[in-house]
Image: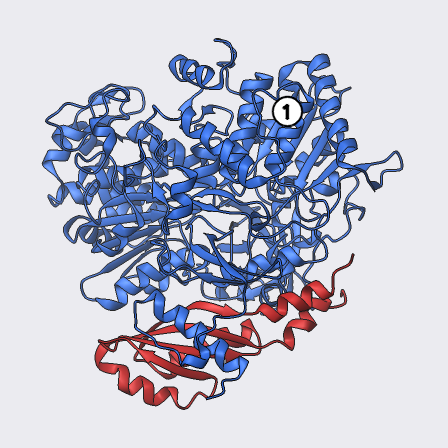
Chain colours: A red, B blue
Amino acid sequence: MRAPDPFCLLWALTLIITGSAIFVNPGDSQTVLERLREFPEITFQVCSENGSELIVNFEAQNQDELDELCRHLRMAVPEIIDIGHVYINFEDEVEQMRGLSRD
Amino acid sequence: MNISRREMIKLSAAGFAAAALNIPFAKPVSAQEDIEVDKWIKGTCRFCGTGCGIFAGVRNGQLVGLRGNPKAVTNFGFLCVKGFKGYTSMYHPDRLKYPMVRGDDGKFKRVSWDEALDKVSNKFKELHQKFGKDSVAYYGSGQCMTEESYTFNKLWKGGFKSNMVEGNPRLCMASAVGGYITTFGTDEPAGSYADIEKARTLFLVGSNTAECHPILFRRVARQKMKDPDNIKIIVCEPRLTPTARIADVWLPADPGTDLAVFHCMARELIKNGWTDKFFIDNLCRFHTGSQVVDFKAYSDFLEQFTPEAVEKITRCPAANIREAARLFGAHSPSMSLWTMGLNQRTRGVWANNLIHNLHLISGNICKEGADSFSITGQPNACGGVRETGSLCQLLPGTRAITDPAARADCEKSWKIPAGSIDPKPGFHTMEMFAKLGSEDDQSKPLKAMLVSTTNPAQSLPNAPKFFKGMKDGFLVVLDIFPTRTTQLADVILPAAFIYEKGGVYGCSERRSQVTPKCVEPPGEAKPDLWIAAQLAKRMGLERLIPWNMDDPNVAYGMAWDDYRECVRLTEHTLYGITRQRLLDMDEGLQWPCPNEKSPGTARRYVRGHDPIMNMPEIVKVPPTAMIYFYGDKQHEGKANVFLRPYKGAEEPPDKDFPFFLTTGRTIEQWHTGTMTMRVPEIARSKPNAYVEINPKDAEAYGINNGDMVKIVSRRGFNIMPAHVVKNSLPGILFVPWFDQDWDRMINRVTIDAFDDGSKQPEFKICAVKLERVGDPKDVADMTIISDVNATFPVSV
């Protein structure tokens, strides 16, 4: 088997911060907000006027962990209809990647 | 209040998400500074055909992040994993940075641009002189910018007077083009993505939308989740994909048998009166392919496709087909969405025709929420290749090269002598690669090929069949990374990435969007447009392609204007889509867009929506017609409803090769993995190809999850791990096609048979046998070809 790409090792050390929306039925927003408190990786920021969209941050070590967190959240909180990400911060990763340039 | 940088990032990230949903969000004063970028530049995503709007964050001359553009009407600010992460591959150290020419010792050596361009242009000139104008081919991509495809197309067809122009969209959407043109007389959908939110029934067919077009799938899934009792989803797909999991009705037909399902649905629509008399009487022409018949003949033809008879052919339960037809006809408006499952077939055009049939006889088209909509696979297959006519049989505006009026119009626009454009189509992709070879081989009329932004040595079906031609011919490759194709090349030209040059992409809904140049390319990499223009200059065609300056914003602007002028008086006119308008607008513009005041067209063929209805200089439409299919070559404003006979796959399973093999994408990976495999997180999540096997088949063959298995077809074999899952029906195997590793490169196994009409190959279906060859083995090696001088895995 080939040695792991150094970029994969690099990623394991990186933290992802997202700007995301959690979609819920308007009547369920309080229930979902209560449940979100069980997840220290999730920061609630603001809710839409009718309560159907919750703006949050997810924090994870990498994309795999983020995907797993979202999957787990959906299963644990059935009132969640959907989760979507609008922004993922990973600017430091690019700098580290450029630092490893083969030039 | 002091806010840490981390808190500031969280607040800014939340601000972007809130803005996407129009939710007021006030950040603390101390966090008002945006995430640390010098500027956010509006553009489009590099992956898939959805056309997601993005903002590219630039800091200190480098791209440091992408975020969704909340005002983009394609994605409303949301992006998928590939969209967020894929671009980081542009900073991978494997980027090709310098021109290279293969030396006498067989190794690539760095040369100057002048040396490389002189070598290519001199060789092309020599071959033209020695073997004629058709001895040199261009093979482009649905990932090139529109201006690039247009320029290469113009250079070849107008400059070299050769129609040897093709591109990888032949492999992904040629059957959709064939379907639209044979049914409606003109290419591309009538409606828009916005119909998704207006439809009550959504028919997803031959499309794993959840993985291949995840942002569009979000729109579908959200509709369903918001109103589950009213919004109904039908999925026709042999695998229980993540897409099929949200379906109200799943139609699991065996690969290649769904023509019978579609005819059966049409029969049910007619039997139950779920039809539209106005459409049938006024807007449909019933056609066998060779003669016009009446509605009764069509109804009689459909009688053979009873639900029970079709269940026997397809394994799809009769009750499911009945229910699907009921939803489609009685729970309208209905919208169909499809991709490669219909297109990559030897009967791809017919499959497309039969979906259009359903919409036409039930009146589910040209209305809000009702459309027959082909989703394209690549970001610019529609805008860059279909619309610019960069295929062997087309001219800009998706006009037939055999049409004398279209040729004359192009010649006038290009200011070349009348009669310059050859009326005979060139070779289609499969023929092109089959006829590429050495100068000594008289059986191979093509002696050279310039390949841009695609990897045919991995992506062609039955790929090894074509290695020798690529190796023996003079092969020039423009790309950003080493690939299987660069391994066979004579010259490698390092290309700039989308954000290093800019340009226009046109997505599945006829929408053009521009991306300006954001950052500098690495090393000496150059935009494809510059490369095309420099070759033109060296071959004495600078007057034809004068945009050879270094500033891409100027060069791409000139090419775009030339293209707009060329298609000004066509049904596909985008004359009103100026580069400046695209730069100014958040959401881009949909053609037809005949002038700078036009808002573009969300719904074609409908008076009051489509400006072409009132443009007699392009096409004459009767003043009383509210809906008129003006592409109709009979000038009756009708669309063809075809009585296509049932025909299955080219190579169905038999006793020697008892399984169907079907191939496709996964959500993480893009095409041959040359970019996504260089994004560590993506590579790690799908590090190697695998074969999905139903548990019943696995048990019968003594295969456990993870065991190494051999998949053998009449053409070749692969060895890879087994994924024993219930997703695939018994008798059907699935393998994703991104893996570059020789053992797992599935196009060694696939079949190169192709559709008679569209010439699109049948990637989706071939017959294979299966054999357990060993215990589980770790093959998560994330194979990429990093060295241009790496040895090719087989002797060619």
Tell me where residue B109 appears, x and y as whole percent: 83, 41
Instruction: Judge the density around disc 1: few (<14), some (14-19), many (≥20) Cα neighbours within 10 Å.
Output: many
- Name the residue furthest top: B418
Tell me where residue B751 appears, x and y as whole percent: 56, 40
Q: Amino acid at mark 1?
A: Ala
Give the residue at x 32% y 67%.
B21
Give the residue at x 27% y 53%.
B196
In the picture shown, does residue B741 fall above or below B276?
below
Question: Mark 1, chain letter?
Answer: B
In the image, taking residue B263 as reference, residue B680 lies left or right, namely right
Give the residue at x 45% y 57%.
B54
Q: Quarter of the image for the C terminus of chain B: give it.
A: top right
In the picture shown, does residue B558 fall above or below B77?
above
In the picture shown, does residue B108 fall above or below B1?
above
- Name the residue furthest right: B105
Residue B267 appears in which quarter of the rendering? Answer: top left
Residue B477 appears in which quarter of the rendering? Answer: top right
Tell me where residue B720 appears, x and y as whole percent: 64, 59
Q: Of B294 and B366, which appears nearest the observer?
A: B366
Element carrying mark 1: helix
Residue A15 appears in which quarter of the rendering? Answer: bottom right
In the image, taking residue B259 as reference, residue B523 lies left or right, namely right
Tell me where residue B182 appears, x and y as whole percent: 33, 28
Asked whether the viewer can see residue B173, the reply is yes
* Residue at mark 1: B536
Q: Of B5 and B170, which appears nearest the observer?
A: B5
Asked whether the viewer can see residue B761, the reply is no
In the image, taking residue B634 as reference, residue B650 lies left or right, namely right
